Image: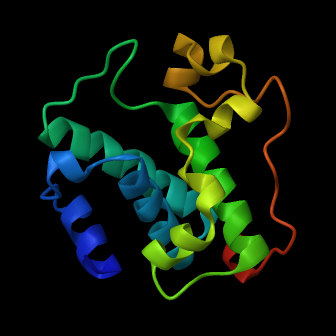
Amino acid sequence: MSDDEHIRQFEERSLPLDLWNHRAHLKVAYLYLTRFPFDEALSRMRDGVRAYNAAHGITDSPTGGYHETMTHAWLQLIHTTLRQFGPAVSADAFFDAQSQLSQKRNLLLFYSRDRIMSPEAKASFVTPDLAPLPQPLFLGERDA
């Protein structure tokens, strides 16, 4: 599926639920980050995931649904990787080249399990307790 089709289906909530996996989340984040400044990409991601979940009957619970810290932290990891290595011809090409992002457990390099799984982390962004999240080395006008 093309990048434009992926983002269209996500925003229209027509992306099949069985395709809404870790990589699909990352692709949306990457596409927003290549089109918008970080804060707008985060806002669109936050609103989009919540709307997608609602449209597909995914309810928030202690172990499911929208998770603010995971959303924010993954966006930060992708943003830093994008700034460090640059964009690719497509989201799939980017993630094929940046295979380190394919591991869902990567956030445990920065967060203890207790902190990332806490109700506070689910509801609002909490800073890591093991190591700071990486920051982009090269800031451009999109970050201004």
Which image quarter: residue 11?
A: bottom left
Q: Is residue 130 left or right of residue 88?
A: right
Work out whether residue 27 or residue 76 is closer to the camera in this orientation and state it. 27
Classify 6 as above or below 93. above
Q: Residue furthest bottom?
A: 89
The location of residue 45, given as percent across then percent down, is: 43, 53
On the question of residue 26 being in view, the answer is: yes
Q: Is residue 108 left or right of residue 44?
A: right
| Residue drawn where x is 58% and y is 22% of the image | 121
Residue 13 appears in which quarter of the rendering? bottom left
Nearest the eye: 50 or 5: 5
Identify the residue shown where x is 23% and y is 46%. Answer: 52
Q: Residue at x 12, y 58 (%)?
A: 14
Is residue 10 rendered to the left or right of residue 129? Answer: left
Decide: is 15 above or below 49: below
User: Can you say which quadrant of the picture contains the C terminus?
Assistant: bottom right
The quarter of the rendered structure image containing the N terminus is bottom left
Q: Is residue 144 visible?
A: no
